[in-house]
Image (cartoon, helix red, strand yellow):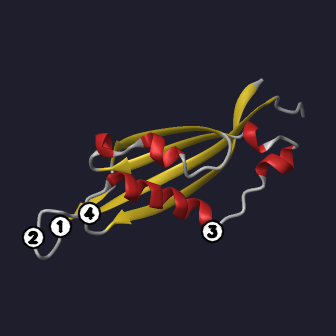
C-alpha cells in the first residue's frame, strides 16, 4: 500500500494578548476543521482511525508550540504535528512586549491505499 493524500485544509489562528503559540496553533487547526465536514473515510470505505493526518503549523517561534496539545484537537486518526518558522507576530500598539501571534495551519489527510489502474 502507498500513502495517498486526498484532502488539504488551511486555517489561521491567533493569540491576541498572551503570546501563546500553542493556543494560536490550536485555533488555526480548529479554523481549518470547524467549517467543514470531512467524510473522506466513509467515501473510501475506511474506518476513521485509518486517516493519516499530517499537520504543519507555521509560527514565529516553532519551539514554543506544544505539538502534542495541538494533536489532541483531532478525535481520531493517526496524527502527526510539525511546527515550522512562519506566521506573524504583530507588535501591540501599547508596546507591552506581547505581540499578537498569528499561526497558519495546513492539514493533509491521507490513506494507505492502492491506486486504481486506468
Q: Residues within 10 Å of mark 4 (few under 14, many from 20)?
A: few
Name the residue at the left extreme.
95
Q: Choose top left, top right, bottom left or bottom right for residue 6.
A: top right
Percent from the top left, x then y, of residue 73? 55, 52
Give the distance between the C-alpha atoms of the residues marked 4 and 1, in whole angstroms. 12 Å
Which disc, if any, is residue 41? Answer: none
What residue lies at 46% left-to-right and 55% top-to-bottom? Answer: 26
Give the distance between the C-alpha atoms of the residues marked 3 and 4, in whole angstroms. 25 Å
Percent from the top left, x then y, of residue 82? 45, 38
- Secondary structure at numbered mark 1: loop
Quarter holding the N terminus is: top right
Which mark lies nearer to you, 4 or 2? Answer: 4
In primary-sequence order, the first of circles 2 and 3 is 3
Tag 4 residue: 18
Q: Residues within 10 Å of mark 2 (few under 14, many from 20)?
A: few
What residue lies at 30% left-to-right and 40% top-to-bottom? Answer: 63
Q: Is residue 95 left or right of residue 31?
A: left
Give the distance between the C-alpha atoms of the residues marked 1 and 2, in whole angstroms. 7 Å
Task: State whether residue 118 is above or below residue 107.
Answer: above
Percent from the top left, x then y, of residue 31? 53, 64
Tag 3 residue: 35
Tag 2 residue: 95
Are the two marked residues, 4 and 1, in contact with CB atoms closer than 8 angstroms? no
What residue lies at 82% left-to-right and 41% top-to-bottom? Answer: 47
In primary-sequence order, the first of circles 4 and 2 is 4
Tag 1 residue: 91
- Secondary structure at numbered mark 4: loop
Amino acid at each position: 500500500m502507498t500513502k495517498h493524500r486526498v484532502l488539504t485544509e488551511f486555517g489561521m489562528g491567533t493569540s491576541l494578548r498572551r503570546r501563546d503559540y500553542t493556543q494560536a496553533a490550536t485555533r488555526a487547526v480548529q479554523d481549518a476543521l470547524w467549517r467543514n465536514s470531512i467524510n473522506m473515510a466513509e467515501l473510501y470505505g475506511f474506518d476513521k482511525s485509518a486517516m493519516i493526518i499530517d499537520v504543519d503549523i507555521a509560527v514565529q517561534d516553532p519551539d514554543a508550540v506544544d505539538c502534542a496539545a495541538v494533536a489532541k484537537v483531532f478525535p481520531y486518526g493517526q496524527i502527526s504535528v510539525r511546527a515550522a518558522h512562519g506566521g506573524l507576530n504583530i507588535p501591540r500598539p501599547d508596546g507591552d512586549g506581547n505581540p499578537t501571534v498569528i499561526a497558519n495551519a495546513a492539514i493533509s489527510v491521507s490513506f494507505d491505499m492502492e491506486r486504481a489502474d486506468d
